Amino acid sequence: MDKIMTETATPIETDVVIIGAGPIGLFAVFELGLLDLKCHLVDILDRPGGQCTELYPEKPIYDIPGLPIVTGQDLTNRLLEQAKPFNPQFHFNEMATKLEKLEDGRWKLSTDQGTQITAHVVVIAAGAGSFQPKRPPVPGIELHENAGDGIGVHYAVRKMETFRGKNILIAGGGDSALDWVINLAPLAKSMTLVHHRDGFRAAAHSVNQMRELEAQGKVKFHVASVKAVHGEPGKLSGVTLAGHDKTEWHHEVDTFLPFFGLTIKLGPIAEFGLNLTENLIAVDTARFESQTPGIFAIGDINTYTGKLKLILSGFHEAALMAQAAFHIARPNEKLRFQYTTSSSNLQKKLGVS
């Protein structure tokens, strides 16, 4: 999917830029914050949590130290609370597309939305890569993607107001599809949901809300699939729907929002000039730094002898990375190792002293 890129006039300056706002990226904010290093995080998703919130928000996780049972969403919430004292800045719905070394030794990261961030250290915590929406197998659909002004085919809702007064068609049966049916229905001129069966993979309360809106006539639901899109490029006028009995009919829409899940791709990170091994970044186990000085990789995106793809392993990697990052970002300062249990200085930063 192509996105319009408009560069920011002045790059944002920070100590560390983190690519990926999943659990490992969020814990990295905490570890870096203890050392007074400020962070900006870039993530292609519209919320923090990475795989935990996108793939299994309600699925229990059993191997987080000290938390016998925790869901993906609850773990994310706890990590956000832990990082809150350090005021991390998030750039959601943005893909890191370009990384270049500046003359002063810092890095400049650019995103597909034109954001530019300069930092002493880059931390790649992108899990298995970036999440990208699955494109429906509909001929010519790419001609209508991201046309602007809420018209055409969109795979994410960046600003709800964009879709006010539109005839909206949403396809899908998961949490994202039903959440946006519920949230956009009050703004839409008309709202239609289609799914290939009369059953959903979404939370029960979301299904109940959708059914209530349907009963009130505010949402139309069809057991159907989209077979074709119509209209000039950039100006969607309607779609062809096909029911379970193969009956087809024309449905007028301004906006088509397909939520068919996500695929994981390494994306532009593969073009950053890093030494990759089967789409993973090789690191040393003392610093978790790549072969390119100043660029670190933590979590599922890295590889080393004995690597275990566990969240708890990523937490360990984040802690060692932060210690090494300090020496790059603050080369003229001495690092004094402290424990949060006994350091009044650290406790003051955390607001618990």
Image (spheres, rainbow, N blue to C red):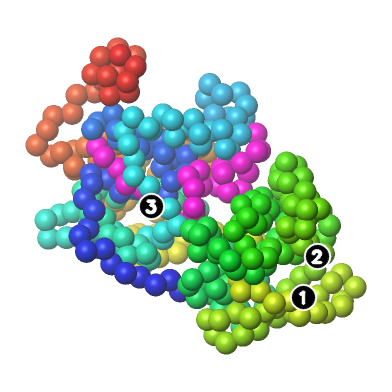
- Separation of residues labelled 2 and 3 (CA atoms): 36 Å
Q: For the residues carrying marks 3 and 1, which lies nearer the camera in this image?
A: 1
Task: Specify whether 128 is left or right of 215.
Answer: left
Range drawn in magenta: 37-60
- Mark identifier at residue 216: none
Residue positioned 43% across, 53% down in the render: 92
Q: Is residue 51 above or below residue 85?
A: below
Q: Is residue 276 left or right of residue 60?
A: left
| Residue farthest right in this picture | 245
Residue lying at 87% horizontally and 78% vertically, measured from the top left: 247
Label 2 or label 3, whichever comes before in sequence order: 3
Asked if residue 205 shows in the view, the reply is: yes
User: What amino acid type should be assigned to the residue bearing mark 3?
Assistant: His
Q: Which residue is mark 3?
A: 91
Q: Is residue 46 a member of the stretch shown in magenta?
A: yes
Seen as rendered, the residue at the extreme left is 332
